[in-house]
Each structure stands twice: as structure tokens, then as C-alpha cells.
């Protein structure tokens, strides 16, 4: 069965529209790359005053006392003595939630899913833990 001329015309129009959309998308992408390249600077062309800002101070070998906590394979070191003491005083569940929230940048929902708790329970543990730490640090 041979397709009608009307059907062939519609197929050709659809084909043209699809090709045109892909071509326009390609042009937009190259314009985007061009705009980005105008703002890029080679690292060798950057001045020393800017390069000196890109560093991390590694003080793990120093003799400062800090508490080390491990959460899901991530090691967290807390250098502030009063804060680490307050965290040690917290129940393990609240300490775990606070460390996940503040050191691993996890949301209450993510923590709740990981620990198999309700989001409201995680929120309650987090806020009560923060209140305890605040009181503990004010007393000291």
C-alpha cells in the first residue's frame, strides 16, 4: 500500500521541524560555550595574589586535640574542645543526626530515610540537641 501524498507531506514537514529544532539547539549550545570561553582565564595567566588564595591548610599532623567521629565512612574531626565535649554528652542518635546535618550537609528528609525515622523525629532530635549544646556551652 502506497502512502498518500498528504501523509508524505506531513511526514516531510515533521522531519523538517525535527531537524530544525536540533540545529537550533546545536547553535544555542555553541553560543553558550562561546559565552563561557569569554570569561575563562588560563591558570598560568592568573596572578600570584589570586593563586595564593587557593589553598587548604592541612593541620592533621599538629598536636591539637580534636574528637574524631566517623559517619558512613566519612571522618569528621572537631577541634573546638567545648563543642566536642558537648557532643560527647549527647545521646548517640542526636549526635549522629547533628553531625549528618551540619558536617555532611544532609537534609532532615535524607537523614530520616537513612536512619529509617520520621522527618519530624529527626527535626525534633536535631533542635533538642542544639538546645542542649547551647545550654552546655553557656554553662561552661
Image (cartoon, rainbow, N blue to C red):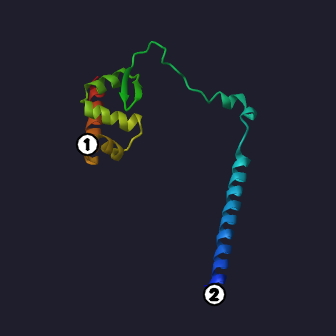
Residue at coordinates 70% horizontally, 65% vertically from top-left? 23
Instruction: Examine the rendered structure and indicate whether residue 39 appears above or below residue 136.
Output: below
Query: Contact, CB < 8 Å: mark 1 with mark 2?
Result: no
Q: Position of residue 133 (x, y in %)?
A: 29, 30
Q: Please, what secondary structure does the residue beneath circle 2 have?
A: loop
| Label 2 Cα neighbours within 10 Å, binned few <14 / some 14-19 / many ≥20 | few
| Residue hosting label 2 | 4
Tell me the quadrant of the picture where the N terminus can be found. Answer: bottom right
Instruction: Examine the rendered structure and indicate whether residue 71 appears above or below residue 81.
Output: below
Tell me the quadrant of the picture where the C terminus can be found. Answer: top left
Instruction: Examine the rendered structure and indicate whether residue 100 appears above or below residue 11.
Output: above
Q: Please, what secondary structure does the residue beneath circle 1 have?
A: helix
- Nearer to the camera, 97 or 30: 30
| Residue hosting label 1 | 124
**Residue at the farthest right position:** 45
> Which corner quadrant of the image does residue 41 belong to?
top right
Residue at coordinates 40% horizontally, 30% vertically from top-left? 73
Q: Position of residue 46 (x, y in %)?
A: 72, 34
Residue at coordinates 67% horizontally, 78% vertically from top-left? 12
Asked if residue 78 lies left or right of residue 87, the reply is right
Q: Nearer the viewer, mark 1 or mark 2?
A: 2
| Label 1 Cα neighbours within 10 Å, binned few <14 / some 14-19 / many ≥20 | few
Residue at coordinates 37% horizontally, 22% vertically from top-left? 68
- Nearer to the camera, 90 or 7: 7
Asked if residue 42 lies left or right of residue 125, the reply is right
Measure the alpha-carbon separation of dots 1 and 2: 69 Å
Q: Position of residue 115 (x, y in %)?
A: 29, 40
**Residue at the farthest top position:** 63
Q: Earlier in the sequence, mark 1 or mark 2?
A: 2
Amino acid at each position: 500500500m502506497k502512502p498518500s501524498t498528504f501523509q508524505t507531506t506531513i511526514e516531510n514537514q515533521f522531519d523538517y521541524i525535527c531537524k530544525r529544532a536540533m540545529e537550533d539547539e546545536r547553535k544555542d549550545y555553541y553560543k553558550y560555550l562561546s559565552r563561557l570561553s569569554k570569561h575563562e582565564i588560563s591558570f598560568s595567566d592568573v596572578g600570584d595574589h589570586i593563586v595564593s588564595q587557593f589553598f587548604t591548610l592541612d593541620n592533621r599532623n599538629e598536636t591539637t586535640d580534636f574528637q574524631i567521629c566517623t559517619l558512613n565512612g566519612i571522618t569528621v574531626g572537631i577541634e573546638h574542645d567545648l563543642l566536642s565535649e558537648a557532643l560527647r554528652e549527647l545521646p548517640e542518635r542526636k549526635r549522629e543526626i547533628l553531625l549528618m546535618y551540619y558536617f555532611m550537609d544532609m537534609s532532615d528528609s535524607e537523614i530520616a530515610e537513612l536512619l529509617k525515622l520520621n522527618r519530624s523525629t529527626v527535626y525534633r532530635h536535631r533542635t533538642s540537641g542544639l538546645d542542649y549544646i547551647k545550654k552546655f556551652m553557656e554553662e561552661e
